[in-house]
Image (spheres, grey):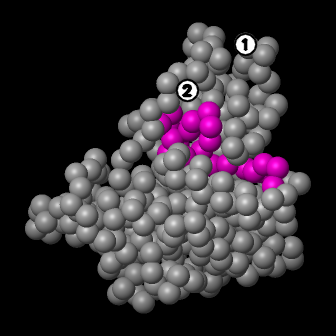
Amino acid sequence: MFKLESLPAYEGDCLILTWGEGSIHRILIDGGRSQTASKVLNYAKTHNLNRGAFELFIVTHIDRDHIEGAVELLENKDFRELIKEIWFNDRSNLNYTPEKSEFEIFGALDGERLTNLIRDHQIPKNLCFQKKPIAVLGDTLPTVTLTGGLTLTVLSPDIQQLEALAKPWDDTIDKAPDGWEHLGGSAPIDLSFLAKSRFKSDTTKPNGSSIAIAAEYQGEHVLLTGDAHVKRLIESLRLYQLKHPQLTGFSVVKASHHGSQGNTSNELVETLKCRNWVFSTNGNYFKHPDQEAIARIITRSPKNTNLYFNYETKFTTPWRTSENNLYKFNTYYGADGYIAVDILP
């Protein structure tokens, strides 16, 4: 078995990657918004998950649509018993660099909450990295093999991207109020035209700090991007290809930053050579996925691309049918924010 599930995370990410033959193993990636925590707990109950059911819990970065639910989950004793280890780059993993940044004001506060929960409940953190940052080091892509044979390779962030997050993190904490710890049918789409639109890369510091991993099991490769930047991903994928010379393409890709046009370039899509793309968002706030990003995926991926949306919204419904005969693609929609993709040879 090798499967990726996207849980109802509103405009955010909450993913479960499952693998194994006979003995089943799982990792959880991000916790979505605070309401998502109950969805994870319901999942655990439905699947009769017991102590240590999740080999790993990865919190990719401190944006609210990834970390809020993680904070809620770690406050729950029953959930804490389900995880063996957490990967998270907290303030101690950043080096101070006085650099101005776009920053989501509550992100650092949630980062501090999560840090305190990990410390107070003595949850094993970043063990495979000797408690150091989870990051690309020069031309070295850190690699970890988990129980059951799943190999994870870190593709993002790099040390410089983590350093850039330090000052806005500190500034947000300094300016936080007392007691913050307790707060809590469209016209035909011209694919060729959209795909050729000028690419302007996402440069926000929190997204740049996002943990992105390649997961390999029995020769199948899955890319879990978080909200990672295109430039870092492309450079890491070049190194990844050198380590896997037989790799002809990824089996599944979770679109970075929920299908934002600033995180999906033609070059990235061509590099990945993937037919199966997963989008995790209900379109709130930022109206993702962007048409430009999906057009780039359809026109630059192998033929008969599959698009998997965990929500059907006004931003994803236009892709239900294609009126362009030049490009063939298939769309699949989840139920109430949940969709599963079997990763097959």
> The disc labelled 1 sits on which kind of residue?
Glu
Q: Residue at x 59, y 10 (%)?
A: 187
Image position of 227 with respect to 2: above or below: above
Question: Is 259 placed left or right of 23 in the picture?
Answer: left
Q: Residue at x 26, y 69 (%)?
A: 96
Q: Which of pointers 2 and 1 lies earlier in the amino acid sequence?
A: 2
Q: Residue at x 45, y 81 (%)?
A: 132
The crowd level at tag 2 (other Cα within 10 Å; few <14, some 14-19, many 20+) is many
What is the quadrant of residue 337 in the picture? top right
The x, y position of residue 248, in whole percent, is 82, 50
Looking at the rendering, the stretch of residues picked out in magenta corresponds to: 247-268
The x, y position of residue 77, in whole percent, is 46, 82
Between residues 236 and 343, which one lies in front from this camera angle?
A: 236
What is the quadrant of residue 297 in the picture? top right
**Secondary structure at numbered mark 1:** loop
The x, y position of residue 16, in whole percent, is 64, 62
Q: Which mark is residue 292?
A: 2
Image position of 268 with respect to 167: above or below: above
What is the quadrant of residue 206 in the picture? bottom left
Question: Is 55 placed left or right of 301 in the picture?
Answer: left
**Secondary structure at numbered mark 2:** helix
> The disc labelled 2 sits on which kind of residue?
Glu
The residue that disc 1 covers is 323
